[in-house]
């Protein structure tokens, strides 16, 4: 790896801490971002010659802060900037700052920064876009491509989100324990949304969108390092690792979705699986069950099965039952129905999802599951009907193509029986 | 003399590497490993999961205290280690310099071994 690539990695890794601390100092998102950009430019000039500092985040915070202050002074007094050496000579100041950064204030900086991005007044799409811009440092162009929208539209979305936050005021006080837990939960939800935004994409968009799950996992790792004893954050990290371990097996050469049962399990990423399992192990010790942990445990049941027929569906059914209690939602019940169909048969599963029709009447997966249960029961006409509704509700071409395969199969079976 | 090379680096940076970057580093390191392996000097080497996967058991109390996370919270974390046979410290530092060229950033702590039990594991145990 070249020097420049290493510096690039160090800048990305230091970004949340540095922007978080600069934001606390300047209390203005735009100014904090500008100060960080400035510090990064100086790092690119300075580090290749002098070598990287021991603590890149501390260096960037100090240089960013000084540069921004000088900027403000220069604007008011028309004075020249001090030369590079003065700003960059940090040997004396770095140590105490590093010590301060290690404390709780530093955790709160990053948490505050993430929390600002998932401000409850912002719609989810703005929360994610803002986090990608501010915390991850992706360019507006990259974010726009990941969301499959135009650059101007994304620019506007981010500007609007920033304006809304500025209008509502940003909470800068250190959060109490209850508030911290609430913030952590909000941040975890935003990270999982970000992950799913990339995960739900079709094969054609995988290249653009694959950055999103990776970035979500990076943020979760950061959160877990700051709050190492939170079982739900362990659960979230484990869940994403286990789901993402299947990324390479999820699409076939033609770009069609490959269902879990049909995936080539040798393509699953063992490294992600073992890390996910290790994190679940750690989380369970806390005996505080939560929705992310249970979902991770479900994903782990699949990861542990060498072949689809080895899957312990009865245990998965139990875990979904637990999830229904912890986080009741018709989508959870729909997922549970798939496990129920394996354990008790399609009839029981169909009875379970029938009452969901009102609430999931606009949901692609509801009709996909319903159709395949009806198909298993040999009720071809009703299955065709459900699949038709699924296609009408599909949000990606891959989803629609997948349902069409089922319809083709129904046609063939129909022709064979005639 | 056997030397341990304890590999420290900023894990936030290392675990941000893309797969391509990771593979580039690994193949550069492999070029350093190979001649050592051919000479019969290359002992076990491991790459650790991130410290977020670590649990620490403090045994200075009874019962021992189990804590989430690594032993010490540091700017750079222990991310792996090598055991390599080197005639002396100079030779060990030469190896460390070669490794550093392949994978800049962070630090190697070079420490002579007092006891070495090669163990009975093979690499397939990792996937179990």
Image: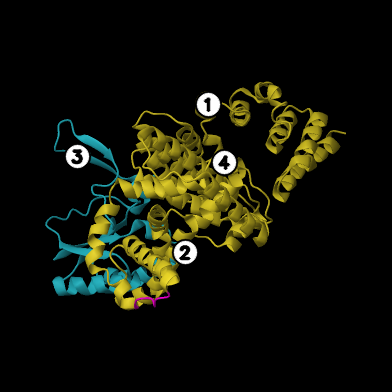
Residue drawn 27% across the image and 58% down it: A97
Give the Cα distance between marks 1 and 3: 38 Å
**Label 4 in the same subunit as label 2:** yes
Which residue in the structure is indicated by mark 3?
Answer: B58
Give the Cα distance between marks 1 and 2: 54 Å
Q: Which mark is residue A118?
A: none
* Callout 4 touching callout 2 (CB < 8 Å): no
Q: Quadrant of residue A377?
A: top right
Which residue in the structure is indicated by mark 2?
Answer: A34
User: Which color is chain B depicted in?
Assistant: cyan
Which residue in the structure is indicated by mark 4?
Answer: A121
Q: Is residue A304 visible?
A: yes
Q: In the visual, does A13 lie left or right of A261?
A: left
Q: Which mark is residue A314?
A: 1
Q: Earlier in the sequence, mark 4 or mark 1?
A: 4
Q: In the visual, does A417 lie left or right of A74?
A: right
Chain bearing mark 3: B
Q: Which residues are magenta?
A: A78-83
């Amino acid at each position: 790896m070249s020097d420049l690539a290493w510096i690039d990695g160090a800048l990305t890794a230091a970004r949340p801490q540095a922007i978080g601390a600069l934001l606390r100092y300047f209390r203005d998102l735009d100014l904090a971002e500008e100060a960080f950009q400035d510090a990064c430019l100086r790092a690119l000039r300075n580090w290749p010659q002098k070598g990287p500092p021991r603590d890149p985040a501390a260096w960037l915070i100090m240089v960013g802060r000084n540069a921004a202050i000088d900027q403000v002074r220069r604007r008011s007094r028309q004075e020249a900037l001090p030369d590079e050496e003065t700003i960059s000579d940090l040997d004396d100041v770095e140590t105490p700052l590093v010590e301060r950064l290690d404390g709780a204030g530093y955790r709160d900086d990053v948490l505050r920064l993430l929390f600002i991005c998932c401000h409850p007044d912002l719609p989810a799409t703005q929360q994610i876009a803002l986090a990608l811009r501010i915390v991850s440092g992706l360019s507006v162009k990259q974010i726009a491509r990941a969301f499959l929208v135009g650059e101007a539209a994304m620019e506007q979305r981010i500007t609007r989100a920033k304006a809304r936050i500025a209008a509502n005021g940003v909470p800068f006080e250190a959060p109490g324990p209850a508030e911290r837990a609430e913030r952590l939960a909000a941040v975890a939800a935003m990270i999982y949304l970000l992950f799913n935004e990339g995960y739900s994409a079709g094969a054609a968009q995988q290249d653009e969108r694959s950055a999103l799950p990776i970035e979500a996992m990076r943020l979760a790792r950061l959160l877990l390092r700051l709050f190492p004893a939170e079982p739900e954050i362990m659960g979230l990290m484990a869940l994403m690792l286990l789901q993402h371990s299947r990324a390479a097996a999820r699409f076939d050469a033609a770009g069609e979705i490959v269902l879990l049962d049909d995936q080539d399990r040798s393509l699953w990423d063992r490294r992600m699986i073992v890390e996910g399992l290790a994190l679940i192990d750690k989380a369970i010790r806390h005996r505080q069950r939560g929705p992310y942990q249970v979902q991770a445990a479900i994903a782990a049941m699949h990861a542990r099965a060498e072949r689809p027929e080895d899957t312990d569906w009865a245990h998965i059914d139990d875990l979904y039952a637990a999830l229904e209690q912890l986080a009741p939602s018709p989508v959870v019940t729909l997922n549970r129905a798939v496990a129920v169909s394996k354990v008790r048969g399609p009839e029981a599963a169909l009875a379970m999802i029938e009452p969901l029709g009102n609430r999931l009447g606009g949901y692609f997966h509801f009709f996909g599951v319903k159709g395949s249960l009806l198909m298993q029961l040999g009720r071809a006409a009703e299955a065709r009907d459900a699949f038709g509704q699924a296609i009408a509700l599909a949000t990606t071409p891959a989803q629609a193509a997948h349902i069409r395969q089922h319809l083709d199969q129904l046609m063939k079976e129909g022709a064979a029986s005639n | 003399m056997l030397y341990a090379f304890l590999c420290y680096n900023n894990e936030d940076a290392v675990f941000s590497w893309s797969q391509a970057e990771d593979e580039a580093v690994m193949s550069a390191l492999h070029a350093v490993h190979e001649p050592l392996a051919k000479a019969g000097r290359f002992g076990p080497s491991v790459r650790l999961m991130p410290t977020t996967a670590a649990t620490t058991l403090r045994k200075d109390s009874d019962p021992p205290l189990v804590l989430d996370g690594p032993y010490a919270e540091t700017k750079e974390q222990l991310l792996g280690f090598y055991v390599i046979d080197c005639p002396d410290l100079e030779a060990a530092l030469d190896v460390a310099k070669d490794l550093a060229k392949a994978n800049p950033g962070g630090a190697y702590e070079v420490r002579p071994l007092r006891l070495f039990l090669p163990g009975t594991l093979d690499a397939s145990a990792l996937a179990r």
